[in-house]
Structure formats: C-alpha cells, structure tokens
Image: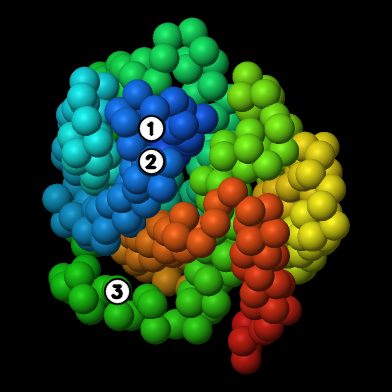
C-alpha cells in the first residue's frame, strides 16, 4: 500500500527531521502544558475544570484549522501556508506566555492551535509530495513522531516547569516555533506541483473522501485510540496526584514510561509492516489496547490505587496504540491517493475534534475518579477493536 504524491514530476524530499519538528509543534503545545495545568490554575485563581478548557479549546482549534489548511496548501503552495501557520503559532504562544488571566490564556491557545494546524497538515502533505518511492516511508516517520510526541512532551514540560515555572513552557514554544520558521525559509523547498492541482471546491473534496467507508472506519478506529490517550493525559495530573498519591515531581518520569510503550509499539509496527498486512497489525494493537484498558478498569474497580498498577496497564494500552494508530491513518489516506492533502486535512480535523469531545466528556464527568476514566478508555478501546475486525467488501488490507 503506497501513498502517491501530487504529481509524477515533483519528487523533492523535504528534510524529514524538520518536517517532524513542525508536525510535532501541535502536540508539543498541548502536552508540554499538561503537567503545569494544576500550578497554572492556582496562579490564575481558577478551578481545575476551568483550566482544562485550555486543552479543549486548543483541540477544537487545531481540528477546525485543519479543515482548510490542506486545501489551502493544495491551491497556494505548501510554504506560504506553513509560514503563515508558524507565525500564528508564535503569536499565540507569546500571548499565553504573558497572559495575566484565564481569558487571554484561552485566546492565546486558540490562536496557537490555528497556527499549529497548518504544521500538522502541511508537514504530512509535503511528505506525501515525495512520491511513491519515499512518501510511504516519510509519512510513517511523521506518524511515529506525532504518536510519540504526546507522550514525550509532558516529560520536557515537567522539566521546564520545575526549572522555571509554567510560563516558561510557552516561552520555550515561542522560541522553538521561531527557529522552525527560520529553518523553513532556509531549508524547505516548495514541493507542490501546481499543474496537478484539481479544481474542486473544499466541500466537493471533503465529500469525496469522508463518504468512503474505508476512510470513515479507519478514522473512527484511530480516533478511538487517540481519544483514549487524550483522556488519560487530561485526567492524569489530577488522577495521579489526588487519587494515587503520586509526588508531582515524578509525573514526568511516569509519562516517559508510557512514551516508551508507545515507542515500542511504533517500532514493532514499522518492523512488522514488511511481513504482515495493516489489518493484522491493527487487530493486534487494538487487542492489546483492550487488554491494557480493561486491566486499568479492573484495578480501579478493586480499589488498587497504586501508581504501578495504573502505569503497567496504560503502558500495555500505549503499546497497542503504537501498533494500530499509524496503520489506521495510512489505511484511511490510501483510500484517496489522488487527494492526499485534502485527505490529511479531513482526517486530522475530524480526529482532533473527536479528541476534543473526548476530553470535554471526561472533564464534565469526573477526571478525579479512576473508575470513570478507566471505563471511558476501555469503551473506546473496545470500539476500536470491533472496527479493526471488520473488513469492507473487496478491501485488500
């Protein structure tokens, strides 16, 4: 299964590490701030539920921004849209850095998210522009980075929080975004072949993609697993400290363990992809996700509020996610090989909006109750496993 570029003539590969850094900006901005949410809430004098709106608004913004980023980059070029997105991200990060109350912080997060959406979409689209020979490998590398960054970012966020406070997280994001912008100007060529651009509208392009059963099923499958991860990450600072008695200073190392699990899953996926079909890897990954989340639910229901019990089960869940999530995305994009940019836009926007709904759901329920959190993650895992077991008529993966 391969992903085609936008033309047969353009085959310039972009620096994959730079594309990875740009694509990861969106994840870094949300997950570096997660360990700092309790301290920021105390500093600004707001309740934890109000501070959690910074995550919900961010996810909604990055999802909405992706709706138009892909089609705009198809029409006007990758570089202009990417540079505009980086400028917005830098502005939003600066506003968050100096915010003196919750209002400017929420506004800055929305601007930050709209800018990050361009990096997420255009980074993947530029990888796809490399053509069949290199596009699949580059897309897989970016998918692995996006998968790992939500788990690694809280580690760095915790470190910055301990050294310089919660505002320093946004200062670091401002500087990092500025550096990425300079590198784009210096090192990143335009990869879009305008002669191959289709003259369809946004609505027509989206309609042709999201009405395909293969795309929809794999979108919901991947979103179910990422939604489970977001639920855990949203609730974990409060859950680990208040329900499991964890020292806040250890949160970063705990996130690192889960990042290791996701990394192992992604590594196994890349190694096994040469010998096993994507559907087999998705079934194996979702089965592990169900096993891990069910273990979390069982230990929570039995009152086993030891951090080790939670971490072991969530590491199993993250390994399963590492196996299944990249394959679900590649399978969804492969359903529309002639519209990779718009397909990336549709997939990313709908996935992030789904994640926003998931985090909003857990915030409105009880993020301090281990049983509620575990039950939500388990329900999403079971849904993903059911979808992974399905096969469309004539499907070859």
- Location of residue 208 in the rendering, given as x and y in whole percent from the top left corner: 33, 80
Of residues 44 and 391, which is closer to you in this image?
44
Would residue 122 be seen by someone viewing this image from the given angle? no
Residue 350: percent from left, percent from top: 39, 65
In the image, what residue occupies the spot 18% across and 34% down?
104
Quadrant for the C terminus in the image: bottom right
Image quarter for residue 171?
A: top left
**Residue 47 numbered tag:** 2
Q: Is residue 125 left or right of residue 92?
A: right
N-term mark: 1 or 2: 1
**Secondary element type, mark 1:** helix
Rendered position, 243 above or below 361: above
Residue 276: x, y in percent? 78, 62
Q: If the image is split into quadrants, where does the N terminus sit?
A: bottom right
Q: Residue furthest bottom?
A: 393
In this picture, residue 311 sits left or right of residue 370: right
Mark 1: few/some/many CA within 10 Å (<14, 14-19, 20+): some
- For label 2, the SS is loop
Q: What label sits on residue 41 in the rendered view?
A: 1
Coloration of the structure image: rainbow
Name the element at disc 3.
helix
Q: Which mark is residue 219?
A: none
Towards the viewer: 360 or 74: 360
The residue drawn where x is 30% and y is 28% is 44
Foreground of the two, 203 or 101: 101
> Are the residues tagged 1 and 2 within 8 Å (C-beta)?
yes
Q: Are marks 3 and 1 in contact (CB under 8 Å)?
A: no
Q: CA distance from mark 1 to mark 2?
A: 6 Å
Q: Which residue is mark 3?
A: 206
Residue 114 position (above or below residue 169) = below
Write the residue at 24% across / 41% down. Answer: 106
């Amino acid at each position: 299964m391969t992903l085609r570029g936008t033309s047969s003539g353009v085959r310039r590969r972009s620096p994959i590490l730079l594309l990875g850094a740009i694509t990861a900006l969106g994840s870094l901005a949300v997950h570096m701030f997660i360990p700092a949410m309790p301290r920021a809430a105390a500093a600004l004098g707001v309740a934890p539920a109000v501070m959690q709106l910074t995550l919900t608004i961010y996810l909604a913004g990055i999802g909405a921004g992706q709706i138009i980023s892909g089609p705009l980059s198809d029409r006007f070029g990758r570089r202009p849209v990417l540079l505009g997105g980086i400028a917005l991200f830098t502005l939003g990060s600066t506003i968050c850095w100096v915010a003196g109350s919750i209002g400017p912080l929420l506004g800055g997060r929305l601007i930050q998210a709209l800018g990050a959406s361009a990096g997420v979409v255009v980074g993947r689209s530029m990888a796809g522009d490399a053509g069949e020979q290199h596009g699949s490998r580059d897309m897989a590398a970016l998918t692995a980075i996006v998968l790992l960054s939500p788990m690694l970012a809280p580690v760095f966020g915790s470190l910055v929080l301990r050294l310089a406070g919660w505002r320093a997280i946004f200062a670091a994001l401002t500087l990092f975004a500025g550096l990425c912008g300079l590198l784009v100007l210096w090192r990143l060529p335009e990869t879009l072949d305008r002669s191959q651009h289709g003259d369809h509208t946004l609505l027509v392009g989206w309609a042709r993609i999201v009405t395909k059963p293969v795309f929809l099923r794999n979108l919901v499958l991947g979103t179910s697993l990422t939604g489970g991860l977001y639920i855990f990450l949203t609730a974990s600072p409060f859950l680990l400290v208040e329900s499991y008695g964890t020292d806040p200073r250890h949160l970063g190392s705990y996130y690192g363990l889960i990042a290791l699990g996701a990394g192992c899953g992604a590594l196994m996926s890349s190694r096994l992809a040469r010998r096993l079909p994507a559907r087999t890897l998705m079934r194996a990954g979702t089965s592990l996700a169900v096993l891990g989340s069910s273990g979390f639910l069982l230990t929570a229901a039995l009152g086993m509020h030891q951090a080790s019990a939670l971490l072991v089960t969530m590491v199993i869940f993250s390994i399963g996610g590492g196996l299944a999530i990249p394959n679900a995305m590649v399978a969804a994009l492969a359903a529309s090989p002639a519209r990779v940019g718009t397909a990336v836009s549709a997939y990313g926007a709908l996935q992030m909006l789904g994640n926003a709904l998931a985090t909003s759901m857990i915030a409105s329920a009880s993020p301090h109750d281990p049983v509620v959190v575990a039950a939500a993650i388990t329900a999403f895992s079971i849904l993903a496993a059911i979808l992974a077991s399905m096969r469309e008529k004539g499907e070859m993966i």
